[in-house]
Amino acid sequence: MGLSFGVFVAFIGVLLLAGVLANKLSSRFNMPILLLFLAVGMVVGGHGLDLVELDPEKHAGPINSLGTLAMCFILFSGGLGTCFRTIRPVLVSGVVLATCGVFLTALFLGVCGYLIFRGFGSDIPWTWWMLMAALLSSTDAAAMFAILRGNGVNLAGKLQPLLELESGSNDPMAALLTLVMLQMVTAANGFSFWQIPLLFYKILGGAVAGLLMGCVGKWFFSRRFEYEGLYYVLGVSMVLICFGIAELLQTNGFLAVYVCGVAMGNMKYNFRGGLEKFNEGIAWLMQVILFTTLGVLVNPMELLGPKVLIPGVLLSLCMMFIARPGAVFISLSRSNFSLKEKILVSWAGLRGAAPIVLATFPLVAGIENSKSMFNMVFFIVIGSVLVQGMTLMPLARRLNLARAFSPKSRAPVEMETVDGVNYDLHEFEVCKGSDLVGKSLAEAKLPPGALVTMIRRGKGFIPACGSTRIEEGDDLVIMGAPDKLHAVSQQYFPDCAYQEKQELPGFLEKSIFK
C-alpha cells in the first residue's frame, strides 16, 4: 500500500505538528519525544498500517546516507550550543569520558556479550560482538536533556556541563570504533596494529579540519550580504563542506562537524544568534525524520521474538550495570567527582539516534547476521530510554543531585551580532537578598557601558529610567559589551553568571594552550 505525493506531504506535516504538540506528553512520562516518533514509524511501516514500506537490507544504503546527513546537522547544532566557558572546568573529565569511556564501554559490553552467548553454545565470533558493542558505545544528548528540560531540573555541581560535553562529543568516537570493527569483521587479514597511527590521524585530523572550517565560517559570516536569509544558507553549506572535506581527507567527518560547531559557537560574527536557533530547528527536523524512518525499518514482532528479546534483555542489563558503570568509574577515577555523582553519571548513559544510525553500516557492508544486530541495537536503545529515562530523575532526587530551576520566557527583543559591533543583550534576575532591591537604577550605579534597556516585572515589561525602583524578582534586560556584562554578573548577579562568547584567538590561547 502506498501514499500519493500529496497525502505523503500532508502526512509529514501532521507528523511534525504532532511532534511539537507531543512535547508536554513526553515530559509527563520522562520519555524523550523522539521515542514517540520511533513508535509512529513502526505503526505506519510495512508491519503496521503499511503506509510506508522499507526493508533494512534493501534500503540500507539510502537510510545510511540519510542518517549520516542527519547526524552532521545534529552534531553541528550541539557544538554551536556549547559554551566553552561553561564546560572548561570539566573539559578533561568530559574528553576522557567521550574517548576512553566510549572505548571501555564497547570493550566491556563486547566481552560480556561474547562470554554470555558462548556459554549458550553460540559460535558467533568475538569481533561480531565487539562491533555491536561499538555501535552502542555512545550516549545521546537529545534524549537525556529532553528529560531534564521536561522535568524543569538542573543537575547539581558540575554534572550538567559534564554530561552535556560527554553526550555531545562522544558520537564521533563511537563512529570511529564502528568503522574499525567493521574493518576487522570484513577484512581477510584482520586489523593491523600498524593502522593505530591512522586512527590518531583520523581523530586529530578531524579536530583540526573542524577548527579550520570554524575559522572559515567566521570569515564568511563576517561578510555583508544583501539578503539576511543567505546567512542561514551559508550555515548549511558550512556543515556540508566541513563533513565532505574531512571525509575526503580520510579523517573523522563527524568530529570535524562537531568541532566546527563548537568553534563557531564561541566566536563573534553576523547573525550568530539566528544561526544557533536556525540550526536547532534543523537538528529537530532531522531527528524527527530520522527516528520516524528508523521506526519504519523495524518489524515489531521480530523485536519480541526470542532471537532478539533474550539477547537484548541480557545485553541491556550488561550495558546498564556493568559496561557503562565500569567505564565511568575508571574514566573518572582521578577526578574530584563524588561517589554519588559517579553513580548518576553511570545511569545517565541513555542511548539514542547514533547507535541506530551506526547499525546501518553493517547492513550496508553486508556482514553476516547484520539484520539481527540491527534489531538488537534497536531493542537496547528502546530499553535504555524506557528504563533509564524513566528512572533518571527519581535517582537524581534520591541522591540529592537535582536542582529545580524556573524557566523564563525570552526577552521580546533580540540583538544580532553584526560586523564591528561587540554588544550583547542579557537578562539578569534580581534574587532575594540582592543589594539592588529597593534601589533606583540611578542608585544602583551599574558599570559604565552597561545599560538597562527594560525590566521584566511579573508577566510584562516596564520601561527603564533612572528613577525606576528595582524590586525582588525583577529581571533586568541589560545591554553592553561582553566584558561589561561579565563584570555586572560577577558583582550583582553571581547566580546568573553571564557566559561570554570569546573570539577565536582568545578561545585558542586561553582555553586550549593553557
Image (cartoon, rainbow, N blue to C red):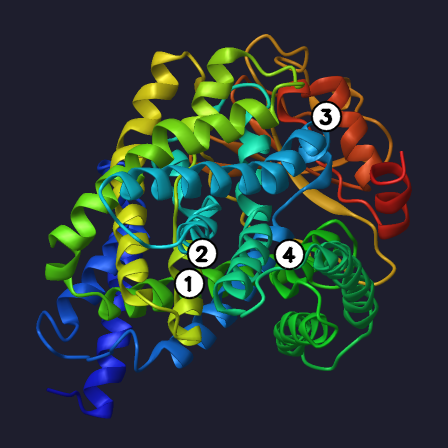
**Distance from Cα at disc 4 to Cα at disc 2:** 14 Å
Q: Is residue 299 visible?
A: yes
Q: Nearer the viewer, mark 4 or mark 3?
A: 4
Look at the picture and state if 157 lies above or below 25.
Answer: above
Instruction: Examine the image and state in which quarter residue 467 appears.
Output: top right
Percent of width and height locating residue 487:
81, 27
> How crowded is the residue under tag 3: few (<14 C-alpha within 10 Å), some, or many (20+)?
some
Q: Which of marks 4 and 2 is in front?
A: 2
Cβ–Cβ under 8 Å for marks 3 and 1:
no
Tag of residue 150: none
The amino acid beneath tag 4 is: Tyr
Q: Mark 1 points at which residue?
A: 357
Horizontal side of 137 relative to 54 (left or right) equals right
The amino acid beneath tag 1 is: Val
**Distance from Cα at disc 3 to Cα at disc 1:** 42 Å
Marked residue nearer the N-terminal end (1 or 4): 4
